[in-house]
Image: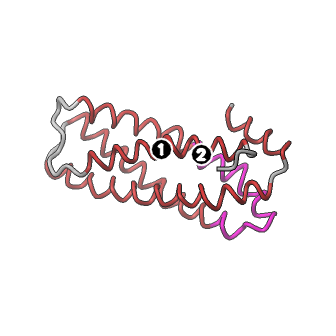
Amino acid sequence: MSESSQIVRALHEDHMAVLGLLSRLETACQASAAPGGDDGSFRSLATQFSAAVETEVRDHFDFEERDLFPPLREAGFGDFADLLVEEHGVIWPLATQVVSKVRQGCDHGWSPEGWGTFRPLALELVERLRSHIEKEERALAQAVVDTFEADADMEIAMSYAS
């Protein structure tokens, strides 16, 4: 992570929070049996995960596509920006599907079939989002440092924080 870029710092903080939730979700999905109705730890994870997807992940994707990718394209990073947008287009529908399934399971109980459908979707999301974050941590961070001057970096980071 670049210590000089406020944008990179903000993105990194988001990434670390989401990676923590992904690890917990992956661990929960390794159980072959569905969580019981009284499983408070899974319900807590489901609530945190759903909220993170619907706010932080959505806002993160929107911010990148609106505020970062256009200047990155102008600076010669268009192919990379397009790749990340394409990944957003795959990850977002999958994430919303996983959130829908997890809410349904938590609200109405997990049937073996419901858990059997949820698990592979959730694990696919973990894999795709983790890979996406790794790309952003390595290549996007460097592209941001190479593209944005300090004043623009601070202004964009502040707009993202608000």
Q: Which residue has dot 2 on it?
A: 12
Q: Where, by quadrant of the figure, is residue 117 drawn?
A: bottom left
Of residues 24 and 92, which is closer to you in this image? 24
**Closer to viewer: mark 2 or mark 1:** 2
Amino acid found under the numbered disc labelled 1: Val
Question: Is residue 52 on the magenta stretch?
Answer: no
Q: Amino acid at mark 2?
A: His
Report the Cα–Cα distance between label 2 and label 1: 10 Å
Nearer-the-camera pick, 105 or 148: 148
At a point 67% along the width and 34% down the height, the residue shown is: 161
Stretch in magenta: 59-82
Q: Residue at x 59, y 49 (%)?
A: 61
Query: Residue 147 at x, y = what percent?
Result: 80, 57
Q: Secondary structure at mark 2?
A: helix
The residue shown at (42%, 50%) is 95
| 31 with respect to 133 (left or right) | left
Quadrant housing the C terminus: top right
State the image coordinates of residue 62 (x, y, percent, origin top left).
62, 47
Which residue is more in the foreground, 123 or 144?
Answer: 144
Say left or right for 32 vs 137.
left
Position of residue 20 relative to residue 41, above or below, is below
Q: Residues within 10 Å of mark 2 (few under 14, many from 20)?
A: some
**Mark linked to residue 18:** 1
Image disc number at residue 88: none
Q: Is residue 97 above or below residue 76?
A: above
Which corner quadrant of the image does residue 59 belong to? top right
Front in this rendered view, residue 109 or 20: 20
